[in-house]
Amino acid sequence: QVQLVESGGELVHPGGSLRLSCAASGFTYRLFTMYWYRQAPGKERELVAYVTSTGGLTNYAESVKDRFTISRDNAKNTAFLQMNSLRPEDTAVYYCNVRLRGTEYWGQGTQVTVSS
């Protein structure tokens, strides 16, 4: 079955960096676009970034552009989200997501807290 397992979230000071990982299994990873979303307390889940199957195209929410970088390693079935210059408003649970034949799959999420 499809599994997405996020890791790498933790408490970090403003201005710091984190790298999130999403390990995928149960589907042909290299064929599908991968997404990162986040959900802050009391807010709707929002799309942060996505990367197409070969890594040739990426897109970002305006709020993270020039600070976050999405990438993938198709040999290791893993997607990454490098987050730099973190701000308190980046505090959220971060989820990876894939859409297979009309069905969305989510990981359990990883908590990122940006606080001094």
Image (cartoon, rainbow, N blue to C red):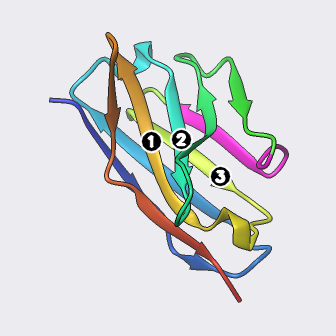
Q: Up-down: is 115 above or below 9?
A: below
- Of labels 3 and 1, earlier in sequence is 3
Residue drawn at (39%, 52%) of the image: 6
Q: Quadrant of residue 17?
A: bottom right
Image-based side of 19 in relation to 33, left or right? right
- Of labels 3 and 2, earlier in sequence is 2
Q: Amino acid at mark 2?
A: Trp
Extent of the magenta region = 63-72
Circles 2, 1 touching at the beta carbon (< 8 Å): yes
Residue 9 tag number: none
Number of residues whose C-alpha sits closer than 10 Å to that of mark 1, classed few (under 14), some (14–19) or many (20 or more): many
Quadrant in the picture for the C terminus: bottom right
Q: Amino acid at mark 1?
A: Cys
Please state which of the two labelled residues, at mark 3 or mark 2, is closer to the viewer: 2
Number of residues whose C-alpha sits closer than 10 Å to that of mark 2, classed few (under 14), some (14–19) or many (20 or more): many
Q: Quadrant of residue 85?
A: bottom right
Picture coordinates of residue 95, whole percent (x, y): 45, 48
Residue drawn at (49%, 29%) of the image: 34
Q: Which residue is mark 1?
A: 96
- Of labels 2 and 1, earlier in sequence is 2
Residue 36 tag number: 2
Q: CA distance from mark 2 to mark 1?
A: 4 Å
